[in-house]
Amino acid sequence: MEVKTIFQNIQNILKKLKKASPPESDDLWLHELFECNLLSTIMEDYVALCFVPSSEPSASSQKRSLKHPPLPNLAGFCRYLKTDVDTLVKVGKKHPTEYGRIMAILEDEALNSDTSATLITSYMKKRLNYEKLSEDSSPSPSTTVTFEHDIFSDGE
């Protein structure tokens, strides 16, 4: 199946889910995608689409052709879904397994890209919350380890 056909099928599914959502809950369609474990599949399609050359020349595609292929990222994925980053993160926190899969895909793409290490580090800290993860896993500064065993008394 062609990437364009896959893209059209996904866009049709998204339109149907958005139409089925009541107006007071604009993110219900996003919850549905998370609950059905479809968002990581859609992410894989988005990533594949990032590496397909565009048939329509535009200013941004001309810039990209001079540099590296575009780096799949959270903002681009939200643009693809026609939602915003805050909404995706908010709904994603209620579905940690599927959200984790999405973040793993983005991490893998970033680490395996030709993008500079400085940009990747900044992106992972700011957008994928790696700075917060490393702070959370570090021991508390008030933790103290005390050994109450006298090594000199051994063997007496």
Image (cartoon, rainbow, N blue to C red):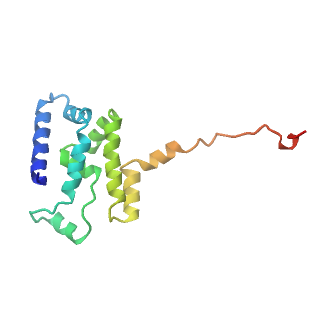
Residue drawn 34% across the image and 46% down it: 103
Query: At which x and y percent is residue 62?
Result: 17, 68
Q: In the rendered view, tell whether residue 124 sits above or below residue 149.
A: below
* Identity of the residue furthest to the front in this view: 155
Residue drawn 28% across the image and 53% down it: 73
Q: In the rendered view, tell whether residue 108 sits above or below residue 139.
A: below
Residue drawn 55% across the image and 45% down it: 138
Quarter of the image for the C terminus: give it.
Answer: top right
Residue drawn 50% across the image and 46% down it: 135
Left or right position of 99 against 79: right
Identify which residue, 148 or 56, lies in the foreground: 148
Number of numbered discs: 0
Query: At which x and y percent is residue 51?
Result: 21, 60
Residue 82 in which image quadrant: top left
Residue 19 in which image quadrant: top left
Query: At which x and y percent is residue 23?
Result: 15, 29
Query: At which x and y percent is residue 121?
Result: 41, 58
Q: In the rendered view, tell whether residue 98 sits above or below residue 115.
A: above
* Identity of the residue furthest to the bottom in this view: 66
Q: In the rendered view, tell whether residue 143 sits above or below residue 59.
A: above
* Identity of the residue furthest to the right in this view: 156
Left or right position of 140 against 19: right
Identify which residue, 5 or 13, lies in the foreground: 5
